[in-house]
Amino acid sequence: MSYAFHSHGAMSSTTAMVLRSLRRPLVTEERPLPVPGRNEVRILVEACGVCRTDLHLLDGELPQAALPVVPGHEAVGRVEAVGADVTLWKAGDRIGVPWLGGTCGVCDYCARGWENLCDAPEFTGCSRDGGYATHMLANAAFCLPMPERDYPDAALAAPLLCAGLIGGRALRLAGEGDALGLYGFGAAAHILAQVARTAGRRVYAFTRQGDLEAQSFARSLGVTWVGTSEESPPELLDAAIIFAPIGELVPKALQAVKKGGTVVCGGIHMSDIPRFPYRLLWEERRLTSVANLTREDGHAFLATAARAQVRTHVRRYSLADANCALDDLRTGRVQGAAVLMPMA
């Protein structure tokens, strides 16, 4: 049994943008309105962020993908119906759906509280349908509260659910040093720059050579220094986070951090890391990666973002323009984050 409320004319179907074949455009499909299972909620999607991970999905770089699939793992919307065993949410609640869509709950990692490393996870918009749609289903236990009092604009809130959450976990692993480098100034970096500056940290932004728009965007957020990935910052960094999926940046970032510094690889996919001399890693520099997130990460970062009054910069697209949004993201035509507005 499920419980529901109806809105937008009691819609009886959903429109979704579906990935049916790798390296091919998404296709529009009309589907029956999905019915939530016992532990699921059905969500009327107000906004869904377009993430670089979605490009990796399209390009066949995520082996966990299950085609056909509806992409999108930064979805904000209203609970429309709940499954019989759902007690966390009720119809009308405003919630967010992040990348981690479910875990087994029984493997060694889950038992130790490391659900981000679960042996049998589900990923929203990858191994289960996501938010590039007017409606979606989600595991109720893995959704996050996104109340309107804190997030009045769903489009501005959507990027927090991946660019923010994964970036927040990366920031935690980077430590609390004062000088922080961000390689690749896109959706995640523009959020973390605001969080770090609020905490009194010095932020150094690295962009692609010739990307004057990204450099100007970084300066508008008050970072300490802006340069290209080929340049050395004016001081050695305490830590660096790499968001660009470019393995060649790893030796550069290691060279830019001081003794005992940390380099965090913040993406789910990266090109191969080239050979580099041991001296770049010596003196207790650390190189680590971020894998997914935990629900605890989600609650903690959303609270931090609210305190820091993070203001995301977004470009809005209609659901029908999802392929255009993906292309704009791929070619660097988006400053900040691209967001689909399915009900617009």
Image (cartoon, rainbow, N blue to C red):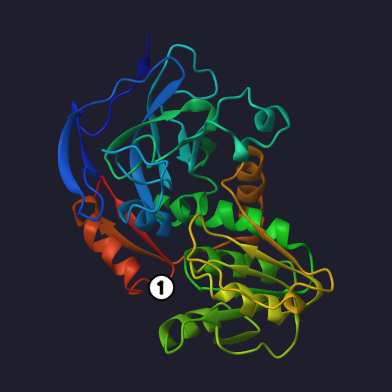
Nearer the observer, 298 or 236: 236
Q: Position of residue 127 (x, y in %)?
A: 39, 36
| Residue in the image at 48% along x and 80% along y | 217
Q: Residues within 10 Å of mark 1 (few under 14, many from 20)?
A: many
| Residue in the image at 66% along x and 56% along y | 307
Nearer the observer, 246 or 100: 246
Identify the image quadrant of residue 137: top left
Nearer the observer, 42 or 19: 19
| Residue in the image at 62% along x and 80% along y | 252
Q: Is residue 14 left or right of residue 268?
A: left
Nearer the observer, 61 or 131: 61
* 23 is higher (above) or lower (below) than 181: above
| Residue in the image at 46% along x and 27% along y | 139
* 236 is higher (above) or lower (below) than 150: below
Identify the image quadrant of residue 110: top right
* 325 is higher (above) or lower (below) than 122: below
Residue farthest toward the top in the current orientation of the protein: 1
The residue labelled by disc 1 is 335
Q: Is residue 155 left or right of residue 246?
A: left
Quadrant for the N terminus in the image: top left
Q: Position of residue 36 (x, y in %)?
A: 36, 20
Q: Amino acid at mark 1?
A: Gln
Badge 1 marks a residue whose secondary structure is loop
Q: Position of residue 85 (x, y in %)?
A: 49, 13
